[in-house]
Amino acid sequence: MTLKRIRARLMNNNNVAISAAPNEAAPRPHLQRFRTCDIDEHGRNLGGWQVRYDQLTPGGFAGELTEFRSDWLQLVRDRSNQALIKSGMAWKGAIVFALPLSANGPAFCAGHTLQEPSLIVAHGENLPELSTPLQLDALGVAIERGALAHALERQGSRFEITDLPKCYRLADPTVRTRFAALFDNLLNGEQACLQKLEYDSIRRGIRDAVMLQVLELVAPDQAPPLNPTVRKRMVDRARDYALAHLDEPLSILDVCNHIGTSRRKLQYCFQETLGINPVAFLRTLRLNAARRELRESSRAELVQTVAARWGFWHLSRFSSDYRTLFGETPSQTLQRTHLC
């Protein structure tokens, strides 16, 4: 894979059109649960979505995904043990509602720190990038736009689909408990539950209950648009510059000169919008990209070649940083890929 192609894939990750809908050509089961120790596999398990997860904290990854589908609604519970950067898109025509059920720290979205339990609402094809904390247990509800618009109109809601993304504070602490209980009930006696879900009336009951809950959450529509902050735009410029110079060692001096700011201000912007310093963040992005390429590479691909392609000139330092972040060496990743 050439450097030009790699760079294009990264820079255009959020602009890839998706034609998948919740009802795909090959029907998926109404209820599915996946457990994995591979971060890329975790993202691929999210049916109809195209997402990328980059790991920020050190250690092996562990994730669990539970998905329920019924007609125009997709309900997902996403659990992960590491802090992540999540980017990408849902299926075409979806409106996505996302809220944390539990987490070990704040999340960051569009440069905003989400300290309190919040509900993010966005168009599926234009999801804001999200920086998530350790031990996140999150809920995602994707609803087909036409079905949502019909319900909003019939109920006289003031919620506007066009003015997104938005972030709502969850004033009712029982909301998260009720959603968590729904998933626990779905998975309690999993085989028996799967049999019940073959009945359309059961699926519709769950679907309609979720829709009613979502409509209650956005009924006041008092949330301002979740626009990127000035600091977040500066962070994005720094990242774009770093990704455009992958064949060079990471230089914060060059980054600062390019975007016209001091190192101190750049560090402040990164801490405020992502909770991490720029050197660590940009190095981590490259490590994630190198790991992704190792997972996709041919057997003949050398670790040193991949490392150099992502700007790591010292193989021993690359291997050490890689093992610290992912809990395995680059060679182990390469070997595990070809054993699967």
Image (cartoon, helix red, strand yellow):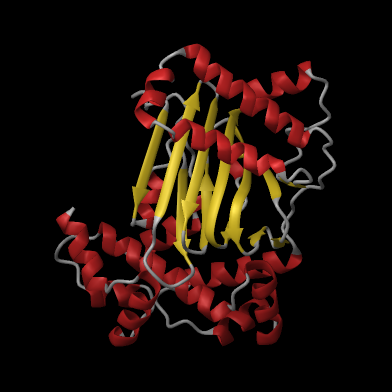
Q: Is residue 297 above or below residue 139?
A: below
| 215 sits to left or right of 206 | right
Res 145 visible: no
Residue 133, x across and y down, in percent: 57, 63
| 334 sits to left or right of 271 | left
Residue 236, x across and y down, in percent: 62, 65
Quadrant for the N terminus in the image: bottom left
The structure residue drawn at horizontal position 65% and vertical position 63%, both measured from the top left corner, is 106
The structure residue drawn at horizontal position 33% and vertical position 76%, both measured from the top left corner, is 323
Residue 305, x across and y down, in percent: 25, 74
Q: Relative to the observer, which residue lies in front, 286 or 139? A: 139
Res 205 visible: yes
Q: Relative to the observer, which residue lies in front, 202 or 75? A: 202
Residue 90, x across and y down, in percent: 52, 39
Q: State the image quarter where residue 149 is shown.
A: top right
Q: In this view, does 255 lie above or below 8?
A: below
| 106 sits to left or right of 181 | right
The structure residue drawn at horizontal position 25% and vertical position 66%, both measured from the top left corner, is 333
The structure residue drawn at horizontal position 74% and vertical position 36%, both measured from the top left corner, is 217
Q: In this view, does 42 lie above or below 73?
A: below
Q: Relative to the observer, which residue lies in front, 16 or 275? A: 275
Q: How many labels does the image show?
A: 0
Q: State the image quarter where residue 265 is shown.
A: bottom right
| 223 sits to left or right of 257 | right
